[in-house]
Amino acid sequence: MALSSATAPVRSAELRRHNLGLLLGQLRRAPSSRAVLAATTGLTRATVASLLDPLVAAGVLAQGPPSRGGIGRPGRPLWFAPTGPVVVGVSVEVDGLVACVAGLDGGVVHRMQRHRDHAGMEAAEVFGRAARDVRALCARVGRPVVGAGVAVPAPVRGTGPDAELLRAPNLPLLAGARPAELFGRVADRPVLVGNEATLGALAHLGVASDFVYVSAGIGIGGGIVAGGRVLPGAAGLAGEIGHVVIERDGRSCGCGGTGCVEQYAALPALLADAGAGTAAELRVAVRAGEPAALAALGRAGAALGTALTSVLHVVDLPVVVLGGSYTPLGDRLAGLVRDEITRRRPSAAVEVLVSGHGRPAAALGTARAVTDRVLAEPDLLLTAPHTP
Ligand SMILES: [Zn+2]
């Protein structure tokens, strides 16, 4: 008896949190009335009202005018209030910073993109400056911030406040850094920290739920998504597609190995091969049909297709999404990659898509991961809103 009475309130709190998370998850996808939410979740209308009405009163949710959509009393659609809480996703890149502020329904409220050479900076400066940028951005948006996350172009061990960056071939001074400590708390909580490609993959869940995501920049990162979930790996190293070897004794790589695909197909290798100074220059040359640019793109596409064939032999997923600095090179690169994969692995068709997000994908995916975390603890939305 003693055990039963001691555990009952806990169960009830957990149940309440679970049901509230379920309702907010529905509202995240589309506005809905209490009656429709009750019908789709199986909760009573009174339970739906008791869970959501405090969030309407707190300004987290807003409701529209009554509309008669069926039998009974007219319903009032609920949605996340346009003046309500927001989350922040930041992507620290080798040569810049991208940040986005998003509502809890995923709608982007504000974006910021900044060029900054992080290659020679100590970790404290990298994350200290990023934190100052985010605080200035939040002040401009003027809505309560309930969480933030930082994506980094390095493998990450752990997910909590102690999350630590492992070797970062393109940002060697960041190895061993703990970004959550250096960034400081946002909304009175430590920031979420994750690998940029793993988080960037999350931004593409609307396109497919089973895919290999490739994010190109100074290096090449990736994420393996199966059943709508990103594979994290035991040591935070899953999806490191850039270090798939395509030439056993090939070019030296920052990871200590040789012949890694990023030495052939990441942006620096591609630009050098094409004789172009910037990605924009390369895009213009490709569109103009310049032979040197087309040949370089052909070699990079074949290299990437070769590496992806090995990945697909192992994970057998039906879709590849090319993102980051590959996005502007678009369908032409996707066609080259698809041709190489098909030639090497004719037994299974694969669709090669181009990310619609490009460079901001990591910041968007980070905002999505932060929202997941907030909605898993929805009572936080009822406490006084914090700004950083
Ligand atoms: Zn490597």
Image: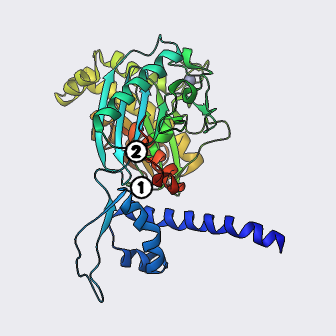
Judging from the image, what secondary structure is the residue with disc 2 in? Answer: strand
Using the rendered view, name the quadrant where residue 130 is placed. Answer: top left
Q: Which residue is mark 1?
A: 208
**Label 2: which residue?**
321
- Dot 2 alpha-carbon crowd within 10 angstroms: few under 14, some 14 to 19, many 20 or more: many
Query: The disc labelled 1 sits on which kind of residue?
Result: Ala
Q: Are marks 2 and 1 in contact (CB under 8 Å)?
A: yes
First-in-chain label (2 vs 1): 1
Residue 345 location (% of width, % of height): 49, 47
How are the colours assigned in the image?
A: rainbow
| Residue 117 drawn at (x, y percent) | 39, 15
At mark 1, the secondary structure is loop
- Looking at the picture, tell me which residue is in the foreground, 243 or 140: 140
Establish if 237 lies above or below 278: below
Q: Quadrant of the N terminus?
A: bottom right
Between 31 and 55, the residue placed more toward the observer is 55
Write the residue at 63% across / 69% down.
12
Outermost residue, top direction?
A: 120
Vertical placement of residue 150 versus 291, above or below: below
